[in-house]
Amino acid sequence: VQLVESGGGLVQAGGSLRLSCAASGSIFSINTMGWYRQAPGKERELVARITRGGSTNYADSVKGRFTISRDNAESTWYLQMNSLKPEDTAVYYCRADVFSDITIIYYWGQGTQVTVSS
């Protein structure tokens, strides 16, 4: 599974951005698709994720502002980010989780920078 992110950039506080993550390869094997972020000096954290069944969950800090979705082919997923705050500034990574009988394999994208100015 290969992942390519796009859509990051610089935006003023209160603005919006939409991130995309395009998957290729064995996309049929993906069970969960997610977005994570890492700010300077901080650990990488979950932002949002969506399962193959459509269940979603979000970090408390983004609930009501961010929405994760995917296309019908389940080969691309998105993160719509509204009402952005300076504390949302981070490198955002998409991740695909592939479950097998005995393990979970995580595939990461290269990351895209999101900078929110105050």
Image (cartoon, helix red, strand yellow):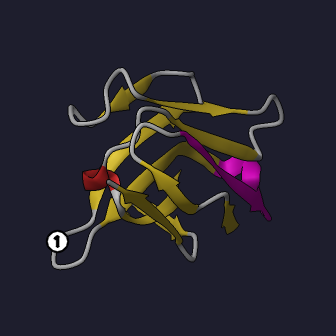
In the figure, 115 relative to 110: above or below?
above
Q: Residue at x 50, y 40 (%)?
A: 15
Asked whether 91 or 21 is in front, the reply is 91
Number of numbered markers: 1
Can residue 102 be seen at all in this image of the molecule?
Answer: no
Q: Residues within 10 Å of mark 1 (few under 14, many from 20)?
A: few
Q: Secondary structure at mark 1?
A: loop
State left or right for residue 59 relative to residue 16: left
Can residue 17 be seen at all in this image of the molecule?
Answer: yes
Q: Which quadrant of the structure image shows residue 84?
A: top left
Q: Residue at x 66, y 43 (%)?
A: 77
Q: Residue 47, percent across and down?
A: 35, 45
Asked whether 85 or 101 is in front, the reply is 85
- Indicate whether residue 98 is drawn in magenta: no
Q: Residue at x 39, y 45 (%)?
A: 13
Point out the stretch of residues depicted in magenta.
Answer: 16-29
Asked whether 26 or 62 is in front, the reply is 62
Q: Residue at x 33, y 32 (%)?
A: 58
Q: Residue 115, percent across and down?
A: 43, 63
- In the picture, the quarter occupied by the N terminus is bottom right
State left or right for residue 73 relative to residue 102: right
State left or right for residue 1 relative to residue 25: left
State left or right for residue 67 relative to residue 58: right
Q: Residue 6, percent across and down?
A: 68, 62
Q: Residue 10, percent across and down?
A: 53, 62
- In the picture, the quarter occupied by the C terminus is bottom left
For label 1, the residue is: 42
In the figure, 63 relative to 61: above or below?
above
In the figure, 110 relative to 14: above or below?
below
Amino acid carrying label 1: it is: Lys
- Indicate whether residue 26 is drawn in magenta: yes
